[in-house]
């Protein structure tokens, strides 16, 4: 496990691009990192719903239309990255690529993931890294906790994705991590609107996670990703999605219970009309909220700290760490 080191050895500011490709969405962060202060300055942060994991749980393969949606988003992101002065198909000034593409649950599960890897490489000039659940959890932990006060630890960070949820426990150092297959898309595809079977599946997943990560051993519960931020936006009654208002908000168990009940009872059109709702989440937000509620009930947490900084930020900082290690290797 790695330490949450806030002072990389290379003090030179860096411009990097991080891409997180999950089961439901693909996201881009272009940022300037200042290792001397430990600050990350966003230049561009965006998300596209591509549903890469469409049908993977049933077929074991990435669907052609899902691949094309993902590749279209990659082409858009390539233009954004180059507009910020980061060259594709090459390395940065320290000999390491300033772009890192991390792929998660759906591409881990798919038989034809080579098609995905080849397509991304052709468009962006970088090898997509199909990481393990434990690696995903560690990157999420770094991104989520870098700004938090260590006195509020230990933290239990969970990243509630489309295909899986990653749990990681730690304070200044990761102590335990586990990925389990209870994501909002996977639960929706498996169970539809059958909340009883969904709850049983979620419980089974949490039982698996608890075998590795002490789910009741944290002082602060930290929730990441679109389901959590959307539920927070609804609970806060925001008239539109507002990252600044959502970031580091604290949402109570009672609020999560009320929002979950409302979402499960609402029609498609009623969910779509919620001001903070992204169109790509309308069909899966009920299942996602149920996973969130299950996590809070299982951990005994009275509230969840919601973070807009997550695996994307962790990926960005990992690029800086790689560059620092490369410099250290050259001078040793």
Image (cartoon, grey):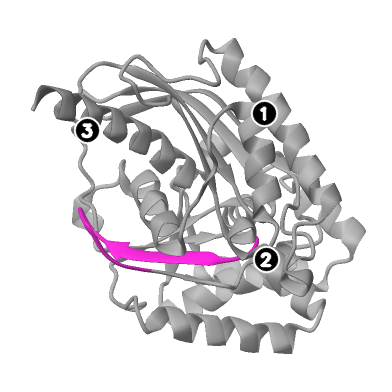
Q: Quadrant of residue 48?
A: top right
Residue 172 among magenta residues: yes
Q: CA distance from mark 2 to mark 3?
A: 37 Å
- Circle 2 residue: 184
Where is residue 183 shown, x and y percent of the image? 62, 67
Residue lying at 20% horizontally and 42% vertically, measured from the top left? 5
Left or right: residue 139 versus residue 9 is: right
Residue lying at 62% horizontally and 49% vertically, measured from the top left? 233
Where is residue 15 shown, x and y percent of the image? 41, 19
Magenta residue span:
162-177
Where is residue 57 shown, x and y percent of the image? 72, 71
Number of other residues with Cα within 10 Å of mark 1, as a class: few under 14, some 14 to 19, many 20 or more? some
Secondary structure beneath disc 1? helix
Q: Is residue 313 above or below residue 114?
A: above
- Circle 1 residue: 123
Labels 2 and 3: the sequence-earlier one: 2
In front of the other: 261 or 187: 187
Q: Is residue 181 above or below residue 152?
A: below
Left or right: residue 270 versus residue 312 is: right
- Circle 3 residue: 325
Q: Is residue 94 above or below residue 183?
A: above
Where is residue 275 shown, x and y percent of the image? 76, 45
Labels 3 and 1: the sequence-earlier one: 1
């Amino acid at each position: 496990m790695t330490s949450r080191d806030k002072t990389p050895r290379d003090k030179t500011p860096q411009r990097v691009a991080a891409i997180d490709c999950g089961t439901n969405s693909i996201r881009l962060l272009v940022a300037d990192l200042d290792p001397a202060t430990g600050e990350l300055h966003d230049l561009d942060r965006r998300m596209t719903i591509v549903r890469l994991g469409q049908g993977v749980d049933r077929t074991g393969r990435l669907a052609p239309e899902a691949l094309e949606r993902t590749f279209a988003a990659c082409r858009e992101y390539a233009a954004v990255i180059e507009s910020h002065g980061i060259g594709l198909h090459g390395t940065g000034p320290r000999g390491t690529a300033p772009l890192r593409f991390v792929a998660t649950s759906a591409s881990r599960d798919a038989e034809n993931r080579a098609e995905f890897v080849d397509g991304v490489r052709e468009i962006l000039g970088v090898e997509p890294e199909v990481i393990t659940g434990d690696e995903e959890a560690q990157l999420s932990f770094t991104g989520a906790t870098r700004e938090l006060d260590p006195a509020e630890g230990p933290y239990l960070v969970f990243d509630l994705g489309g295909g899986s949820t990653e749990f990681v426990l730690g304070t200044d150092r990761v102590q335990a991590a586990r990925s389990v297959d209870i994501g909002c898309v996977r639960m929706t595809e498996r169970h539809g609107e059958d909340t009883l079977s969904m709850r049983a599946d979620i419980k089974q997943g949490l039982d698996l996670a608890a075998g590795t990560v002490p789910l009741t051993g944290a002082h602060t519960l930290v929730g990441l990703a679109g389901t959590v931020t959307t539920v927070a936006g609804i609970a806060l009654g925001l008239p539109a999605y507002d990252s600044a208002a959502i970031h580091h908000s604290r949402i109570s168990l009672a609020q999560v219970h009320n929002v979950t009940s409302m979402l499960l009872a609402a029609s498609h059109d009623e969910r779509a009309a919620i001001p903070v709702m992204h169109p790509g989440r309308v069909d899966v937000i009920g299942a996602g909220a149920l996973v969130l509620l299950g996590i809070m009930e299982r951990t005994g947490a009275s509230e969840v700290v919601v973070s807009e900084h997550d695996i994307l930020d962790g990926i960005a900082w990992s690029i800086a760490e790689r560059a620092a290690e490369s410099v250290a290797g050259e001078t040793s």
